Image (tube, rainbow, N blue to C red):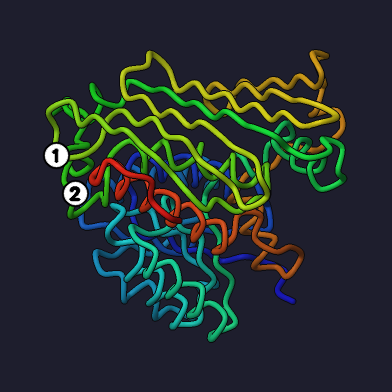
Amino acid sequence: MPDEARIGLIGCGGIAGRHVQWLLDRKECRITALCDKSREAVADKLAMIKKLRPGEEPATTEECKDVLGRDDVDGVCVLLPHSLHHPIAKAALEAGKHVLVEKPMVTDVAQAEDLIATSEKTGRKLGIAYQRSFLPEYLYVHRMVQNGEFGQVRFMTAHVEQGWYNIVTNPNKKRGWKTDPAQAGGGQLVDTGSHTVAAMLYVCQMDPVEVFAFIDNCGLNVDVNTSMAVRFAQGAQATVTVGGFGHSVTESIRVVGDKASARIFFRTVKEQALEVNGEVIDAPSIIPMSNPDSNFVDVILGKAEPGADGLLGLRVAQLSEAAYRSAETHAVAKV
């Protein structure tokens, strides 16, 4: 097994800063290549790396193929507009690189199935940057479900809100691509909402089979507000609400079963809380906190499997597609 994870970043926009920080928190990791069409974005992340790791200077390029052809790149982080996730992640897997892709993994179910098949064919690992799968509160409830501590799960609620509309319509934010269906694959549901849908599916470990959804685009070409009802094969029901007019990134997930109930509260990646049967649980004192990038380093080093894998990405794509179909047809959609 390698003793160092050598990683290339494909995409150096704003989200890349968090990945740089988390990757370089691991001494076993070295960022060896940066790729972006924007020289300004590359220069910004290069300066960040030099500050965190004086003396280290990754190669820079505008071409993805230059990164994928390097012998000193074991894995890549794909940090691009949503529509580019599938072709670049697929090319990286076929080039023999492990892949960590930003959310959403892809923009449709067929792409998700293709990436999973490519990962299996090449033997390279595929992970998604869903932070909730690495936070103690979500892991705690995930384990409760695994251990049968809820009994039969009867219903769940999942809610997220963010000032998404103002962000994507503000020309100074440079997020206009998120309102282009061809680039984004959807709106707030597949953007920040993707995190919440993935968190619910990760926690409950159940299979959605039917969805009824209402969607409001609020004058944009993509969705801003979504509310949906979900039925699972295991008998449980859920409501999911995704709002684009919040005042911070705030999320809550509630799981209710015959024997127990739990509520997770999340605000950014800095504030989380957990209650089980109304009692506060100090989950971080029980389960260590991690993140997708640290996990990706361990995946490359052969120490772990992806904490948020291609199957989770597929399930998110399936549920999101069904929600869009339902809203368009004003009818229940099969997942």
Q: Are marks 2 and 1 in contact (CB under 8 Å)?
A: yes
Q: What residue type is labelled 1?
A: Asn
- Towards the viewer: 218 or 97: 218
- Mark 1 neighbour density, 10 Å: few (under 14) some (14–19) many (20 or more): few
Dot label at residue 181? 2
**Residue 238: which quarter of the image?**
top right
Dot label at residue 19? none
Residue at the extreme front of the image, as rendered: 331
Residue 91 x, y percent position in the rendering = 37, 77
Q: Which amino acid does label 2 sit on?
A: Pro
Residue 298 x, y percent position in the rendering = 70, 60
Q: Is the residue 4 above or below the residue 148 in the image?
A: below
- Towards the viewer: 198 or 24: 198
Residue 116 x, y percent position in the rendering = 51, 73
Position of residue 183 in the picture relative to residue 205 (left or right): left
For marks 2 and 1 on the same chain, the one whose residue lies earlier in the sequence: 2
Query: Which residue bears the numbered disc 1?
Result: 221
Position of residue 255 in the picture relative to residue 315 (left or right): right
**Residue 164: which quarter of the image?**
top left
